[in-house]
Image: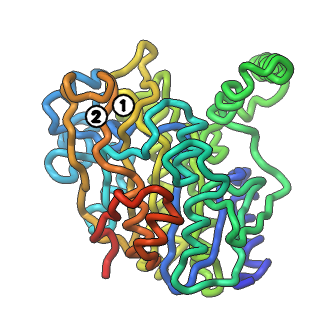
């Protein structure tokens, strides 16, 4: 082990003591000082709210009440380049952009073009062109393909190692004694998974119904209401920050891991999504707080760090009948860190007019997310083209890595 048990338990205890730790993050070691953190935004982030293209002539009318005001207006976006902005809750990321430590990718997607969370997340993590195309994850295969090998096992803090980090590369796991209850996004995915099961489906529905009755009566589980990302309760930012602080503490240790994965849930905003305030704004604020806490915990090591935040797909361009958005296609992704050559929005913008929306409803994807991931792995961790195109992301030889993402 390149990091001792005491440092692991101490860092994990920061989150566990506050009830913040969910089975949500994993670690691995890589040679050198370069540190990589992948944040999985489970549930499909609305990129048109996270990084509003306020300069697009169709944006305001298409988004309606979900539109973010232009920079300078009341609760307006943080301006990036005169066309794109960041949500008002992303003040920390806006400051990172000003320091040239943030790149925003827009109209980006994996090869997946359907709308199942399960399949979309599986493909996002397995790195192949198809859901369930591999039983291991692209980041695990990347660790095996590093130019210089490391004998240190990875560490998963929580009950499960996410698919993205599963595989032959060494990954161990440790879980705290107390974990928070499942959040609404996880419950919804379980309901969908077992909907057709004649035994488990009705049993799960009955159990949730009973729990809801108890919650409403105040008998049990009242403190679970509003549980959001990372077990966030009424303050998701506080809990996401605690998780990220634990990650940063471990990554900053001289003998600690150098690659981490953690997930933030609650992005499936079908109803009452909100614009500058509301459910999505809370989630974005939590993401912003988590990255700030990660940077603070890393200290001087932040200069060697790249954080890649990705989601399985985007959301519909227009609001639905319940003031939310449904599953879409094109999304936004973020690359932030002291090692990032930032201060840019990288996009081949397709526009939002009705004639160019994907299937008449979604932001059309114009960038392959694998190109982003390949660029980071190539420039930050030193992986070669053959490993990236054949082993890490199979059947992706035609997808060239983006260049110039990491400082030389």
State if disc 1 and disc 2 touch (CB < 8 Å).
Answer: yes
Residue under pointer 2: 68
Among the 4 quarters of the image, the one containing residue 157: bottom right
Q: Nearer the viewer, residue 407 or 55?
A: 407
Looking at the image, tell me whether mark 2 or mark 1 is earlier in sequence order: 2
Q: Going by the image, does 170 lie left or right of 365?
A: right
Residue 238, above or below 256: above
Quickly name the residue at label 1: 275
Residue in the picture at 37% in, 41% down: 331
| Quadrant of the rendering where the N terminus is positioned | bottom right
Is residue 328 or residue 389 the one in the foreground? 389
Report the side of 69 relative to 269 (left or right): left
* Residue 66 spot, x, y in % from top left: 33, 27
Query: Nearest the camera: 146 or 44?
Result: 146
Q: Tell me, yes or no, if residue 214 can be seen here.
A: no
| Residue located at (49% from left, 24% from top) | 270
């Amino acid at each position: 082990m390149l990091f001792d048990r005491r440092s692991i338990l101490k860092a994990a205890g920061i989150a566990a003591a506050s009830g913040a730790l969910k089975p949500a993050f994993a670690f691995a070691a890589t040679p050198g000082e370069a540190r990589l953190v992948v944040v999985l935004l489970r549930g499909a982030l609305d990129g048109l709210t996270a990084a509003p293209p306020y300069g697009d002539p169709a944006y305001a009318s298409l988004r309606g009440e979900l539109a973010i005001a232009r920079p300078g207006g009341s609760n307006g976006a943080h301006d990036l380049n005169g066309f794109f902005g960041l949500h008002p809750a992303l003040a920390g990321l806006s400051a990172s952009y000003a320091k040239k430590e943030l790149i925003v990718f827009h109209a980006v997607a994996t090869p997946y073009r359907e709308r199942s969370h399960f399949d979309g997340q599986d493909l996002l993590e397995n790195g192949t062109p198809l859901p369930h195309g591999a039983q291991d994850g692209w980041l695990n295969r990347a660790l095996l393909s590093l130019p210089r090998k490391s004998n240190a096992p990875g560490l998963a803090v929580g009950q499960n190692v996410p698919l993205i980090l599963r595989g032959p590369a060494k990954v161990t796991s440790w879980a705290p004694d107390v974990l928070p209850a499942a959040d609404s996004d996880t419950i919804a995915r379980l309901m969908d998974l077992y909907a057709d099961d004649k035994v488990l489906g009705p049993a799960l529905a009955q159990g949730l119904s009973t729990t809801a009755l108890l919650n409403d009566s105040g008998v049990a589980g009242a403190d679970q209401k509003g549980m959001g990302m990372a077990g966030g309760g009424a303050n998701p930012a506080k809990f996401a920050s605690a998780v990220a602080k634990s990650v940063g503490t471990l990554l900053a240790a001289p003998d600690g891991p150098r690659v981490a994965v953690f997930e933030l849930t609650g992005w499936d905003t079908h109803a009452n999504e909100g614009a500058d305030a509301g459910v999505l704004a809370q989630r974005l604020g939590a993401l912003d707080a988590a990255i700030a806490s990660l940077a603070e915990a890393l200290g001087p090591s932040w200069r060697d760090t790249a954080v890649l935040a990705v989601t399985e797909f985007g959301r519909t361009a227009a609001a639905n009948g319940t003031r939310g958005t449904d599953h879409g296609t094109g999304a936004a992704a973020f690359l932030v860190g002291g090692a990032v050559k930032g201060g840019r929005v990288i996009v081949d913008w397709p526009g939002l007019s009705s004639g160019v929306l994907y299937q008449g409803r979604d932001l059309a994807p114009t960038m392959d997310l694998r190109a982003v991931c390949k660029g980071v792995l190539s420039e930050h961790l030193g992986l070669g083209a053959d490993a990236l195109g054949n082993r890490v992301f199979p059947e992706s030889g035609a997808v060239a890595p983006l260049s110039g993402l990491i400082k030389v």
